[in-house]
Amino acid sequence: MLKGDVLTEARGLRRSFGSRTILDDVSLTLRAGEVTGFVGANGAGKTTTIRLMLGLIRGEGETLFLGRPLYEWGSPSAVVGAVLGGIAGHPRHRVRSHLRMVAAGCGASDVRVDELLETVGLTGAARLRLSQLSLGMKQRVGIAQALLGNPPILVLDEPGNGLDPHAIRWLRDFLRTQAAEGRAVMVSSHLLGEMEQLADRVVVLSRGRVVASAPVEEMLSHAVSRRVVTVQSPDLPGLARLVQEQGGRLEPTGGPSAHITGLDRIRISSLAADGGVALYWLSEAMPSLEDFYLTIAEEEFKIS
């Protein structure tokens, strides 16, 4: 498989509880060599989407893994590995024993278990009981379990929840490595700032609907278009005229201060200098991916 090849395609996913629609025509693709960030506020429908993709719940639409529904594969664990939170094992079982038991069920060897313990950095914790593990260590065990069948597709639901900064950095670097090896990686999260450093592509879910889907760079370029420049000037009316002539907008915020949108700070300073308008202060705030998400989610809320 080559980078960019579509390994997973979800089409028209729908899910309802009575008269309440949880998911409404959700479609997305996962590509080899890429990390796809699946983002949205808590309750947006991310977990429901993932469970429907994996066939764990019923609904409408279809999801194809390597061109076929998951249930048509004789060994699903060799196609997709999933981390859905927690470890489905007895708390008194030791890490290595737990993974060997799961490996036996999917046809993986004990050697594979030891390889993955080293890969996720848990060789020294292999004899710990599951009940003794920290949250970050449990996430690593879950990832090792998902990789036992060496699947080309990896799906993780909110893997960063509750992790400390060190564990989040390890997770980010690990998932980037998995994508670099050719896997299609999907990570759901409400931590939008983390997606800027992790994801290649972002799919934004709001109230059960996909409201944006694009490469991170494109998302950020749209966010940049929403930049806000803060100025202070003794002649705000004069500056407002100059800004409006160039397609910008000035909104006074009190006293000599104002916010300007639609123009960057360099263009504003040049306009002020050419127009003879003094500036006391000039600073520019660049919206983050999280700011952009919150904006489009708010717009979606107003539309619906």
Image (tube, helix red, strand yellow):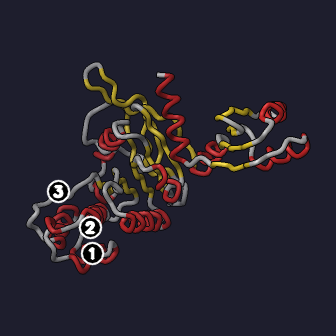
Q: Which residue is drawn at 83% across and 33% down?
A: 238
For badge 3, the amino acid type reads Ala
Residue under circle 3? 88
Element type at mark 2: helix
Q: Which of 165 and 259 is in front in this view?
A: 259
In the picture as drawn, the residue positioned furthest to the left comes out as 92
104 relative to 80, above or below: below
Residue 260 makes an appearance in the image? no
As drawn, 68 above or below 241: below
Please name whichever residue, 125 or 269, is drawn nearer the observer in this view of the structure.
Answer: 269
- Residue 171 in which image quadrant: bottom left
Q: Local crowd at mark 2 within 10 Å, few (<14), some, or many (≥20)?
A: some
Q: Quadrant of residue 69?
A: top left
Q: Kindly check if marks 1 and 3 are in contact, taking CB atoms under 8 A apart as contact.
A: no
Q: Earlier in the sequence, mark 1 or mark 3?
A: 3
Q: What residue type is labelled 2?
A: Met
Q: Residue 190 carries which label?
A: none
Q: Are marks 2 and 3 in contact (CB under 8 Å)?
A: no
Residue matched to label 1: 122
Identify which residue is drawn at 43% across, 30% down: 25
Circle nearer the N terminus (2, 3)? 3
Q: Where is residue 133 in the image (x, y as percent from the top left)?
A: 20, 67
In the image, what residue occupies the spot 53% across and 43% down? 291
Q: What residue type is labelled 1?
A: Leu
**Residue 137 badge:** 2
Q: Distance between the residues labelled 1 and 3?
A: 18 Å
The answer to whether 114 is drawn above or below residue 47 in the figure is below
Nearer the observer: mark 2 or 3; the answer is: 2
Q: How many marks?
A: 3
Numbered disc 3: secondary structure: loop
Is the C-beta separation of discs 2 and 1 under 8 Å? yes
